[in-house]
Amino acid sequence: MKPIDSRIKVDIDNDRIVDNDVVKLSREDFVIDYSGKKITLKEGMYVYLYTDDTDDKGDPSFIFSEGIVIKNPYGALTLFKWFCKLKGEIVYVNKNGEIW
């Protein structure tokens, strides 16, 4: 599994407009990853994502996902320029790194 410091932050629960497997990435041509590094987005690039979350006990956890960068498929429905078409499973990880 790709480490969190190379992942891009998204809100996987709230950043889906129409399709369940497409999330918003950016209104600009770049995003900032977990470690603060600026990543220039290009159509077709593969990206690794994370969302801050909490587990059933209220402890910090993460949601990990990944996918392919695509241009805005929704036109005037949103101001976002870049989206991510999710691939594979969405993984929930607790503060100890255990998948749940």
Image: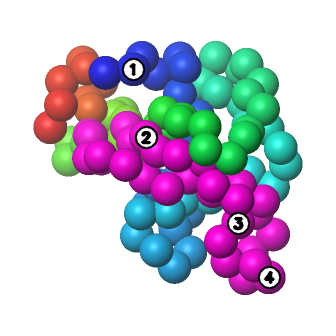
Query: Mark 3 = which residue?
Result: 72
Position in image of residue 12 (x %, y %): 46, 55
* Dot 2 alpha-carbon crowd within 10 angstroms: few under 14, some 14 to 19, many 20 or more: many
Q: CA distance from mark 2 to mark 1?
A: 10 Å
Q: Which numbered disc flags the more N-terminal residue, 2 or 3?
A: 2
Q: Secondary structure at mark 1?
A: loop
Q: Which numbered disc flags the more N-terminal residue, 4 or 1?
A: 1
The answer, for residue 43, to whether it is visible in the render is: yes
In which quadrant of the rendered view does residue 6 lie? top right
Q: Which corner quadrant holds the C terminus?
A: top left
Query: Mark 2 = which residue?
Result: 66
Q: CA distance from mark 2 to mark 3?
A: 17 Å
Q: Secondary structure at mark 4?
A: helix
Cβ–Cβ under 8 Å for marks 2 and 1: yes
Q: How is the image coloured?
A: rainbow
Q: Secondary structure at mark 2?
A: strand
What is the three-letter code of the residue carrying label 3?
Asn
In which quadrant of the rendered view does residue 55 lie? top left
What is the three-letter code of the residue carrying label 1?
Lys
Q: Is residue 85 magenta?
A: yes
What is the three-letter code of the residue carrying label 2?
Glu
Q: CA distance from mark 3 to mark 4?
A: 9 Å
Residue 76's disc is 4
User: Which residue is rendered at x = 76% and y = 63% of the image?
Assistant: 80
Query: Mark 1 = which residue?
Result: 2
Q: CA distance from mark 1 to mark 3?
A: 26 Å
